[in-house]
Image: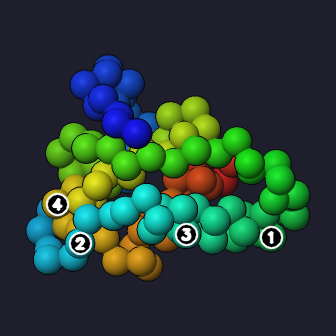
Amino acid sequence: MRVRTNDPVFTATGNVLSGATSTAQPITTESALATALASAKSYWATTLGIPLASLSDIRIAIADLPSTTMALTIGRTIYVDRDGAGGGWTSTTLYNAVKQELGHILGQS
């Protein structure tokens, strides 16, 4: 999937996670995103006592987000910057970012 981030919605304030701009950590991958999203869905389903199936329409995609934006949510889609705003990703930071963005979708943060 290719995401165009020149759309005005990507410059709007709101559900945007910003972060560091330099480290040697790697870029994210589709498989890493899938793992982080599955774990985040399980976390929120358990925390909120909702069926995991109710989160089946949540989507996630790699994008080249502007500036120091690490992740953002538009509707029920989470966009994750491919290189973590220049800071790269570890599995822990990726999971935490996805969990936070999913929380935005669910009205929890």
Helix, strand or loop at mark 1: helix
Helix, strand or loop at mark 4: loop
State whether residue 43 is above or below residue 76. below
What residue lies at 34% left-to-right and 77% top-to-bottom? Answer: 90
Mark pair 3, 4: CA separation: 21 Å
Mark pair 1, 2: CA separation: 30 Å
What residue lies at 29% left-to-right and 31% top-to-bottom? Answer: 5
State whether residue 97 is above or below residue 14. below
Q: Residue 86 bears which disc, if any?
A: 4
What residue lies at 34% left-to-right and 36% top-to-bottom? Answer: 2
Residue 64 lies in quadrant: top left
Q: Residue 26 bears which disc, if any?
A: 2
Callout 4: 10 Å neighbours few (<14), some, many (20+)? many
Q: Is residue 69 visible?
A: yes
Mark pair 2, 3: CA separation: 16 Å
Q: Amino acid at mark 2?
A: Pro
On the image, the x and y values in percent for residue 18 come to: 30, 54
Q: Residue 35 bears which disc, if any?
A: 3
Of labels 1 and 4, earlier in sequence is 1
Helix, strand or loop at mark 3: helix
Of labels 2 and 4, earlier in sequence is 2
Determine which residue is flagged by label 1.
46
Q: Nearer the viewer, residue 96 or 33?
A: 33
